[in-house]
Image (cartoon, rainbow, N blue to C red):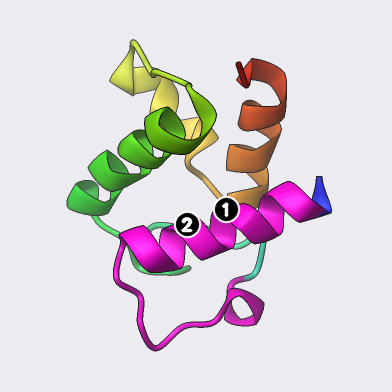
Amino acid sequence: MEQLIGELKEHLIEELNLEEITPEDIDSEAPLFRDGLGLDSIDALEIILILEKYYGIKLSNSAEAKPIFYSVKTLAEYIMKNRK
């Protein structure tokens, strides 16, 4: 799980162009949106692409994304359960 969390942080930094942030700067349990990393709806679309590209996971219902996209940890837990 820790390895997956580290990997996810790397993908987020790379794919979302968070150039001034290191993986250590990202709290695994902090919110990704608003107060946490401050991501927006465009970033949410990028996260969907990360799930498809690296983990073979397609989100069929965007309404289910909100709890999954809460933090890096919730994303990692979802990937562990649904990875192909």
The residue beneath circle 1 is 8
From where the camera sits, is residue 29 visible? Answer: no
Where is mark 2, residue-wise? Answer: 11
Asked whether the residues under the numbered discs 1 and 2 touch, taking CB atoms below 8 Å apart as contact, a structural biologist would say yes
Residue at the image position 40 percent from the left and 41 percent from the top: 50
Is 84 in the magenta? no
Give the numbered dot on residue 55: none
Q: Position of residue 47 (x, y in %)?
A: 37, 43
Please name the predominant secondary structure of the magenta segment in the image. Answer: helix
On screen, residue 25 versus residue 39, left or right, reads right
Q: Quadrant of residue 28?
A: bottom right
Q: Position of residue 17 (x, y in %)?
A: 29, 71
**x 65%, y 69%: residue:** 27
Residue 22 among those drawn in magenta: yes
Residue situated furthest bottom in the rendering: 20
Quarter of the image containing the C terminus?
top right
Which residue: 62% across, 21% down?
83
| Stretch of the chain drawn in magenta | 3-26
